[in-house]
Every structure is written in C-alpha cells, then in structure tokens.
Image: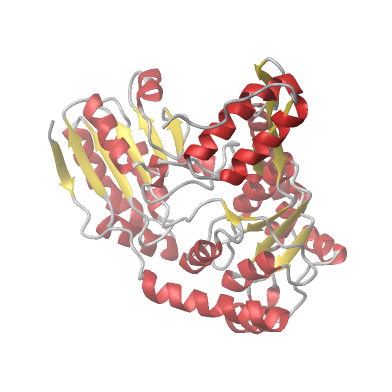
Amino acid sequence: MARNYLKKAPKTSATDSASVHDTVRGILNEIEEGGEAAAMKYAAKFDNYEGALILSKEEIEAAAAKVPQKLKDDIAFAHENIKHFAEAQKASMQDFQMEVRPGLIEGQKTIPVRAAGCYVPGGRYSHIASAMMTVTTAKVAGVKHITACSPPQGENGVAPAIIYAANLCGADKILSMGGVQGVAAMTFGLFDLPEADIIVGPGNQFVAEAKRILFGRVGIDMIAGPTDSLILADKDADAEIVAVDLVSQAEHGYNSPVWLVTDDQPLAEKVMARVPDLIEELPELNRDNARAAWRDYAEVIVCDDRVEMAACSDDYAPEHLTVQAADLDWWLDNLQCYGSLFLGEETTVSYGDKASGTNHVLPTSGSARYTGGLSVHKYMKVVTWQRSTRDGSKRVAEATARISRLEGMEGHARAADVRLHKYYPTENFDLTPEE
C-alpha cells in the first residue's frame, strides 16, 4: 500500500553527538575528580548562579509564598491525578511465590531503589509538570531519598513554582544546579546527597548525553531526544483541532518533529493551509520554534486506509500518538508502538504533558518500539528468590551437576555434588553427562 507524502521533512532529528559527547565527558571527568568545587565552578559558569545549592526549608517556604493560589490549586489537581495513576501502576506489580516442583519454592519481589535524582528542566521555561511527573512517581514507588535538581534562572535561583511543586510531591532535597553539573552532583553524591541509584527526567542534549555516558554506573529512565508527536486523523476529524494540536507540539523546539497521517487528502490540505497562520499567532519564542519545526521536520502523509495508517504510525513509533478517527477501540487494539496514546479529540497531548495523570517523560526518536515511558516501574527492581527442601533440591542438584560438567564448569558441578553426598550419603548418583 502506498504512502503519499504531501509534506516531506528535509531534516531528521539528530545532534552532533561527537562534539557533545566530548564536551560532556570532559565536564563529568573534571567534576568526578574535583568534586564539589568543580561542580560549583560549572554552576557559576553555565547557570550564572552562586547562591545556595541545596535549598533550606526557609528558602522553600519563601518560594512557595511567591506562587499564586490558583497555580497552587492547579498543581495540586495535577499532582493528585499523577499520584492516583502511579498508585494504580504500583498495584499492578505483584510479589508472588510458587512451588515449581514439590519442595522447590521460587518467587518474585519488587524493591524500590534507595535514591533517585529527578532532573527538572528550567531555563527559558519553568517545567513545573516535569517536577510533578518525576518526583511523584518516585515517591509512590517508595524511594527513600528523592533529589529534585533544576537549573537556576541566574541569580534569581530556581523558579518558585518548580520549588513548590517538587516539595509538594515529596522531594527530600532540592538542588539549584543545571545541566551536566547537576546530573553529576546527583550521580556522585556531592553536597551531602546520597549517590543516586537512578537519574530520571528530560533535559537538553547535554543532559541526555550525560545520562548516556553515566548509564551503567547509575540507572536512567531513557535517553531522550527532541520531543515528537503524530496524529492519526480520518475524514471526520476537525481540521482546526488537528492543526492546533500539531502546532502545540511543534512549539517545544526547533527540531521537534510533528507528523499527520490520514486517509483523507482534503483534510490534510486543510490542516497544511491552517498551520502557518496558527504558528504566526504564537508568542515570539514559541513562534520561532514552531516555524522551524514545521518547516524542517514536519511531515503529512496520506495512506490508503486505516490499516496502512496504523502501520505507518508503528513505523514512526512516536513519543506522543493522538487518534482523531472513528472506532477508537479498533485503534487501541491495533496500535503497538507509541510512548503515550491519546484517543479522541476530547483529550490531547497537552493534557498528558501537564495535568491528566499519565507520565509525560516518554521515549523519543523511535525508541517507543522497545520501551515505554517513566513510571513507578522504573524506580523498582524486580528480583527473584528461591528456597528448597532437601528432597526438593535432589533432582535439581543432579541436573545441575551434569549440565555444569557438560559445560566444563567443574566448580559448579561440585557445589551440587557436595549437597547430594551430604543429604543422601547412602545413595549412588550418576553425575557425569552422556557424551
């Protein structure tokens, strides 16, 4: 089946990874060697900030006093939604045990990590929602220590609304530090913070590269690229709403891809005609981002039918996937690759980004093919355990001894032998494998 590109992107979302990698590696090495002094040097250089790095209770209260009550109410509303959804996710993870064979008992146990570092983007935008998404899920998971880290806005420090949200959602410490140095401080346990077991949260390409380099030494949620969004729309979709939704996601950044996939060319043409005007109505910074994203990264694709539309969407594996088409249950049953799915025009990616309750830290750049987004599960380890009676271990020991010898691992075999000889001293066992 054919895919007709009414608009084809001249660029793809890629970064100059070599130069970014070298820069980030150098900063991480210097901070690991130089410790807090090196981190503070980079904070002064990149954040233009020399104030308190770990915010005191008094500083947190002072920030809260600056947040308007209506915003506090909205933050509380969103926090409750995120918390309720995260609690349901946690409830879906069950410890269990089973008797695999008579006397051989095995089980699964879920254990939260001990310390989490939650990076909250700041700078030109105050990402209040990211503070709620990352800290709330860690708290519900049962993480014992949560650090929220966000770049200060020059000498003004971290945005008061971010401080308020992070504290409300359960952060134990709030670190006023951005970029690579913030990620390094949480990973290395600087400023009396515990060394993080996992670093989560979105950030720019330098933050993403720091997480990539540190992965293995510390856990991460994912390596995020520019945010992306795809809309599936049929002939009955509202072209105005489709266009507005595309623009709402294009404003994230100059290289944030947005895609429209439809089986109705007249709808596609209406949307393409409307988007440029909607972009020009945005504030200046948002307008510049959306204009570049639409020009360089957006695509509009016309397919033969909904089966091909679904296949096209799965090939893109978008971070955000919206369906504005008939028979929503069919799409829910058939779509397979996405970070988060928004079914029907009554919901939108913007809801998920801010307040509806599902997490907005999601896989980008096609990684939804193999992973989902941030959740309670990311903060929890699924571990296994076993115990056995002597009779229950007998057959396991025989099989272990023979398999181990076949593999040439005599030490493993003898660990089984010694138990058989102890528990059944009068029995003769054939513990050599058949060649």
Up the image or down, 197 lies above or below 308; here it is: below
Question: Exactly how many numbered labels are in the figure?
Answer: 0
Which residue is more in the foreground, 107 or 147? Answer: 107
In the displayed structure, 246 sits above or below 32; it is above
- The residue at 37%/49% (across/down) is 247
Residue at the image position 60 percent from the left and 61 percent from the top: 217
Q: Is residue 351 visible?
A: no
Q: Residue 240 at what x, y percent from top left?
A: 33, 38
Q: Position of residue 324 (x, y in %)?
A: 36, 29
**Quarter of the image with the C terminus in it:** top left
Determine if residue 344 is in view. yes
Up-down relation of residue 91 to residue 49 (above or below):
above
105 and 33: which is toward the camera: 105
Relative horizontal placement of residue 307, taking residue 373 as reference (left or right):
left
- Quarter of the image with the N terminus in it: top left
Q: Residue at x 67, y 55 (%)?
A: 197
Q: Quadrant of residue 147?
A: bottom right
Question: Which quadrant of the figure has residue 428?
Answer: top right
Could you tell whether 399 is left or right of 367 in the image? Answer: right
**Which residue lies most toward the right here?**
58
> Residue 274 appears at what percent x and percent y?
27, 46
Instruction: Give 372 or 57, whichever is nearer the viewer.
Output: 372
Q: Position of residue 270 (x, y in %)?
A: 22, 39
Which residue in the rendered view is the most extreme toward the top? Answer: 102
Colouring: secondary structure
